Image (spheres, rainbow, N blue to C red):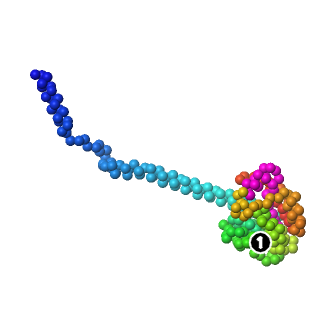
Amino acid sequence: MAEKIARSQSGSITTQFLSAQPLRPLRLSDEHSDATGFTAETQRAPSWRRELIEALVHGIKRRWARERRRRKVGRAYDMAKEIARVIPRGSEVLDVGCGNGFIAHHLSALLGTSIVGIDLGNSAAAAIDYRRYDGAQFPLMDDSLDAVLLCYVLHHAHDVRVVLNEIRRVLRDGGLAVIYEDIPGSWWDRGVCWIHNQLWRGRTGACTFRRESEWRALFESIGFEIVSERRLSRWRNLTHPVCRRLYVLR
């Protein structure tokens, strides 16, 4: 009899379990009450992190661009101070291949006069008297300048004699040509010059680097007198550590 009662109770419990309503999903809170709300909440966190990372990357890029500009301006100022010791104050100067124009800008303040800058581009970053250069004839009159400046430019010239003759044309009697050049003296210097050539040959054509004796012979063949020359430290620009030389011609 007891065994029949036990079987009856077991069957009753099984029937109740099978007829019970299905279990409802667990409700964590009102925000997670359904699948859509839960998905939106889980996607919000990655979006916030992505926006933070993008803001950090943008800030780093802006900082790096500002530092690069500061270094360019600083190096240009150092060179302008060095050039101002050679060129008399008040001189009318032409900066050939002026690039961003920072050297001409600083030199203008140091010499107390306006500096003309020419290059192949349409404009310069600095506020200077900029004129576009066609690569052949300087856009200035004969005998109109007291000094001409070429900062690491001559090795880019397709015909260096044309440039040197243009310098002679625009200089007044007793005028100066101040020339900075990379010198491929050692194997290290030749390697640096080779890399420089690879970087620039697609934009300005192949570069022609000369040794000290070759530059002297070239200047003298055009009719220039070498007033002074001196070797410069290769570590002036750590990104371009090559032997350099400064020539002052008349």
* Placement of the N terminus among the 4 image quadrants: top left
- Residue 69: x and y in percent read 65, 60
**Residue under numbered circle 1:** 136
Q: Amino acid at mark 1?
A: Ala
Locate residue 146: give its quadrant: bottom right
Left or right: 229, with 196 as reference point:
right
Magenta region: which residues? Answer: 177-197
**Residue drawn at 13 percent across, 28 percent down:** 8
- Residue 38: x and y in percent read 35, 49
* Placement of the C terminus among the 4 image quadrants: bottom right
Q: How many marks?
A: 1
Tell me if I can see residue 21 in this picture: yes
Front residue of this view, candidates 206 and 113: 206
**Residue drawn at 17 percent across, 29 percent down:** 10
Task: Determine whether 179 is above or below 47 in the image.
Answer: below
| Residue 191 lies in the magenta-colored region | yes
Left or right: 25, with 49 as reference point:
left
Residue found at the very far left of the displayed protein: 1
**Residue drawn at 72 percent across, 57 percent down:** 198
Front residue of this view, candidates 221 and 201: 201
Left or right: 8, with 203 as reference point:
left
Front residue of this view, candidates 132 and 59: 132
- Residue 104: x and y in percent read 73, 67
